[in-house]
Image: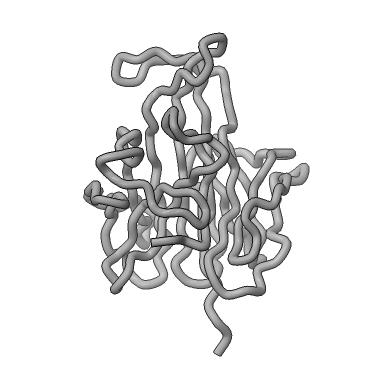
C-alpha cells in the first residue's frame, strides 16, 4: 500500500539511506489496534523477511491513570510490529533498538535508538516519557523536544504533513518547535533524527563508539464536520 505520510527519519540497513526512511506508530486498518511501521514517505512499508528485521528490540506501552507504564506484548508481523489495542484517546509510546551499524570504515560504529509517541485523536498536551521525546504543548502543532529530561535547544527537526514531505525546522532556545501549517486533514509528524552522543558500549556483543537517538511525534488531523 502506498502511503502519503511518514515518520521518524532514521538509520536504515546498508541498502537504505538514513534520510529516506522513518519509524512511527499508526492506527491499523479495521480498528485492529496500533502498530509500528517502517517506511519511506509515500512508499511501501518495509516488511519481514526484509528490512523490518534490522530492528532487534521493539517495545510499546501506554500510561495508566497513575502515570505508570502498561506494556504491550509486541508481535512482529509482515509489515509492522503489532502493539495492541489502546483505550480510546490514549497516547501510545514505543522504543526500538536497531542493529549496530558500521556505515563508514573510518568512523565509529553506531548504536541507533528510536523513540516515538502517537496521539490518536487531535492534539493532547504531554509530559516527557522517553529518553528523547517530542512532547506536545498545550498549543496544537507546537512541541518541546527533550533529551534525558531536559529541553534540547537549536536541534534540527523535520516536519511532514499531507502536503509537505520533509520541511526543515529547528527548535528554539527553549527546545520548542512549531509546525508551520496543520490545517489540512491527514497525518503529521515532527521528527528529530540521529542526534549523536559519544556513549560507547556493546549491544549483543557488538561494540559501538556512538549512540544515536531519533524521536518523533505523530498525530492526525480529522476532516472538519
Q: In terms of depth relative to the viewer, which is nearer, 61 or 218?
A: 218
Which of the 4 image quadrants contains residue 141?
bottom right
Q: Residue at x 46, y 18 (%)?
A: 102
Which of the 4 image quadrants contains residue 82?
bottom left
- Numbered marks: total: 0
Q: Quadrant of the C terminus?
A: bottom right
Q: Residue at x 44, y 61 (%)?
A: 2
Q: In terms of depth relative to the viewer, which is nearer, 59 or 36?
A: 36
In the image as oriented, which residue stretches furthest toward the right? Answer: 173
Q: Is residue 151 above or below residue 144?
A: above
Q: Position of residue 165 (x, y in %)?
A: 62, 55
Q: Position of residue 20 (x, y in %)?
A: 54, 42
Left or right of residue 218: residue 56:
left
Q: Position of residue 130 (x, y in %)?
A: 47, 43
Q: Position of residue 89 (x, y in %)?
A: 41, 70
Left or right of residue 35: residue 209:
right
Amino acid at each position: 500500500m502506498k502511503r502519503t505520510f511518514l515518520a521518524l527519519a532514521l538509520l536504515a540497513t546498508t541498502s537504505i539511506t538514513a534520510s529516506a526512511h522513518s519509524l512511527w506508530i499508526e492506527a491499523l486498518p479495521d480498528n485492529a489496534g496500533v502498530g509500528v511501521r517502517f517506511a519511506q514517505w509515500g512508499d511501501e512499508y518495509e516488511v519481514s523477511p526484509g528490512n523490518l528485521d534490522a530492528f532487534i528490540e521493539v517495545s510499546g506501552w501506554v500510561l495508566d491513570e497513575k502515570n505508570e507504564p502498561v506494556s504491550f506484548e509486541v508481535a512482529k508481523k509482515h509489515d509492522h510490529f503489532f502493539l495492541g489495542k489502546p483505550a480510546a484517546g490514549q497516547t501510545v509510546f514505543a522504543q526500538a533498538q536497531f542493529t549496530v551499524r558500521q556505515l563508514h570504515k573510518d568512523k565509529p560504529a553506531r548504536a541507533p535508538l528510536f523513540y516515538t509517541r502517537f496521539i490518536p485523536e487531535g492534539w493532547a498536551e504531554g509530559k516527557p516519557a522517553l529518553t528523547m521525546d517530542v512532547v506536545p504543548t498545550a498549543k496544537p502543532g507546537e512541541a518541546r523536544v527533550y533529551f534525558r529530561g531536559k529541553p534540547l535547544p537549536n536541534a534540527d527537526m523535520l516536519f511532514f504533513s499531507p502536503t509537505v514531505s520533509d520541511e526543515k525546522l529547528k527548535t528554539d532556545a527553549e527546545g520548542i518547535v512549531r509546525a508551520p501549517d496543520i490545517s489540512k486533514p491527514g497525518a503529521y509528524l515532527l521528527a528529530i533524527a540521529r542526534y549523536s552522543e559519544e556513549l560507547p558500549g556493546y549491544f549483543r556483543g557488538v561494540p559501538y563508539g556512538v549512540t544515536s537517538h531519533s524521536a518523533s511525534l505523530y498525530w492526525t488531523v480529522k476532516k472538519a464536520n
